[in-house]
């Protein structure tokens, strides 16, 4: 696992040298998924940090994003006439490339962003009978839609919906939905 984080740091450092102007976008929000083994909805939260680099024509922001998503659900099953409660918690660390294709004028812009990268996940199950945990890694892809309001040349806020698919065995269909609010600032 440490070598994956080392590779992530090298990737971010490489993008750091590609452009002179760049933005740091920090965002947080709500996440929703469906856990496979119990077929129930799990909700939670999401945080992420993106380094964004404007293209020469200012219509594309190239971005590398590192985030964390935590979803959990508690279920109650009957066994021998007794209720058995189990809590499932899934933690995911996605690292991906997500260029924002911008639409609109300088003060208010919408965008669409495809995303492709990798993810590392953990599953923890705690309950009446047993505790179990496991780890997984795989592909992370999806699509985001959002809008940005520029407060001035160096600061903006954004609202975003992101639909993502991750290839691991913890989610019943692999889909994670999230809504986040973010703050971006220019790094000079």
Image (cartoon, grey):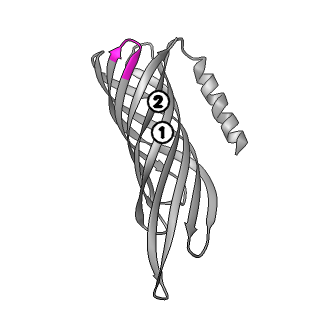
User: In the displayed structure, would residue 130 be above or below residue 147?
Assistant: below
Towards the viewer: 169 or 81: 81
Image side of residue 5 versus residue 174, left or right: right
- Residue 2 locus on image (x, y percent): 72, 42
Instruction: Give the CA distance from mark 2 to mark 1.
Output: 8 Å
Please tell me whether mark 1 sits on a helix, a strand or a loop.
Answer: strand
- Residue 15 locus on image (x, y percent): 58, 23
Give me the residue at 63% from left, 34% from top.
Answer: 8
User: In the displayed structure, would residue 57 be above or below residue 117?
Assistant: above
Give me the residue at 45% from left, 19% from top.
Answer: 185
Q: Which mark is residue 26?
A: 2
Span of residues in magenta:
151-156
Name the chief secondary structure element in magenta.
strand
Tell me, yes or no, whether the two marked residues, 2 and 1, touch with CB atoms within 8 Å. yes
Towards the viewer: 39 or 87: 87
User: In the displayed structure, would residue 91 be above or below residue 26?
Assistant: below
Q: State the residue position of label 1.
A: 47
């Amino acid at each position: 696992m440490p070598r994956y984080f080392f590779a992530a740091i090298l990737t971010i450092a490489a993008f750091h040298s590609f452009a002179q102007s760049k933005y740091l976008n920090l965002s947080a929000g709500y996440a929703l998924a469906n856990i496979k083994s119990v077929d129930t909805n799990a909700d939670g939260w999401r945080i992420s940090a993106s380094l964004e680099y404007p293209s020469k024509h200012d219509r594309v922001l190239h971005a590398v994003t590192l985030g964390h998503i935590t979803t959990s659900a508690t279920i109650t099953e009957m066994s021998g006439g007794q209720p058995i409660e189990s809590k499932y918690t899934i933690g995911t660390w996605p690292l991906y490339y997500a260029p924002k294709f911008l639409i609109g004028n300088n003060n208010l812009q919408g965008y669409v962003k495809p995303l492709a990268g990798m993810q590392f996940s953990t599953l923890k199950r705690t309950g009446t009978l047993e505790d179990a945990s496991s780890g997984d890694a795989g592909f992370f892809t999806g699509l985001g839609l959002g809008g940005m309001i520029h407060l001035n040349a160096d600061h903006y806020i954004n609202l975003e919906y992101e639909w993502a698919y991750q290839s691991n065995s913890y989610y019943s269909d692999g889909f994670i939905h999230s809504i986040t609010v973010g703050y971006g600032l220019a790094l000079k």
